[in-house]
Image (cartoon, coloured by chain):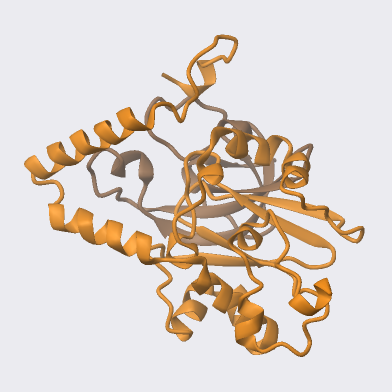
Chain colours: A brown, B orange
Amino acid sequence: MSFRVGDRVRVADRVHAGHHRTPSYVKGRSGRIERVHGPFANPETRAYGSDGLPEQVLYQVAFDLEPARTYVDVFEHWLEEER
Amino acid sequence: MNDRDHDHDHPHEPIAGDQGSVAARARALEELLVEKGVVQREDVRRNVDWLVSRSPADGARLVARAWVDPGFRERLLEDARAAALDLGLDPGPSPVVVAVENTEQVHHMVVCTLCSCYPRALLGPPPAWYKSLPYRSRAVSDPRGVLEEFGLELGEGVVELRVLDSTADIRYLVVPRRPDGTDDLGEEELAALVTRDSMIGVAEPLAPASAIV
């Protein structure tokens, strides 16, 4: 599943015990794809000595949070298509 | 420990804690990594030298050029890494650097809620407050309150405040608004007005000397 700018997505609401770069405050939240940054090594495996392959596509996702619109970079395997 | 089950209803020492013990731990880690052959001592020294040689002056040059050259401004907003290379600057190891522009209507501010990601190549080492837990949490939960504490009052025309959380590989640089009364200034004089904090989005650039009189 790859996404395009403008797509509505939802961040998976899951617990990940190891190193990961998805902040808790957006887990389970819906947002909109703002930019497609391209493929990057996966920090969840790279943190433990691996090469981080296969790469995961990194997206900038816009979330309308209460105080201000917030843009967070989220890897593809954390995103689900919003229906 | 998972950060989600770490309640703060108990007292403990400030997270920044005892700098002495942090330094000792860093030294111990370095010793171990060198001993195991994971890093070379020379690499550590070279990286530290590189980091402390960086300064916000490089970011300021990018901003000042964008203020005087519309074509460069476009290039900077399109691909900040390429724009930095155009000026002979070192954009750093991050493969993607994104510049975002403040306008009369939109104000951007940058945070790294998970640690201290920062465009070090273009701005130098991050300030201590940028790495502090209060800034990292409140930039998202109460960004307007944070800006107020920095003494930044958003203009009346600002209808949207955008917070950029640099959670991964991308580094963000804010292009602040060019101050009024700077039409006669050259690029170098303009660059002198562009502060580090204005490129993080928690301040406006300095006013030109003539405006203070």
- Which quadrant would residue B183 be assigned to in this image? bottom right
Image coordinates for residue B179, horizontal then vertical, percent: 78, 73
Compared to residue B9, the image places residue A42 above or below, namely below
Query: Residue pushed farthest top?
Result: B10
Q: Quadrant of the C terminus of chain B?
A: bottom right
Compared to residue B89, the image places residue A3 above or below, namely above
Image coordinates for residue B112, horizontal then vertical, percent: 54, 45
Query: Residue pushed farthest right?
Result: B156
Residue B21 in view (yes/no)? yes
Q: Nearer the viewer, residue B70 or B40?
A: B40
Is B178 left, or right, of B49 in this rendering? right
- Which quadrant would residue B29 be assigned to in this image? top left
Q: Residue at x 42, y 58 (%)?
A: A39
Q: Residue at x 55, y 9 (%)?
A: B10
Is A57 left, or right, of B198 in this rendering? left
Q: Nearer the viewer, residue B119 or B130?
A: B130
Is B60 left, or right, of B13 in this rendering? right
Q: Nearer the viewer, residue B141 or B133?
A: B133
Compared to residue A55, the image places residue B12 above or below, namely above
- Which quadrant would residue A82 be assigned to in this image? top right
Count every numbered label the image shows and give the total: 0
Q: Residue at x 50, y 14 (%)?
A: B12
Q: Quadrant of the N terminus of chain B?
A: top left
Compared to residue B207, the image places residue A49 above or below, namely above
Residue B73 in view (yes/no)? no
Image coordinates for residue B203, horizontal then vertical, percent: 70, 57
Image coordinates for residue B192, horizontal then vertical, percent: 62, 75
Q: Residue at x 31, y 28 (%)?
A: B21
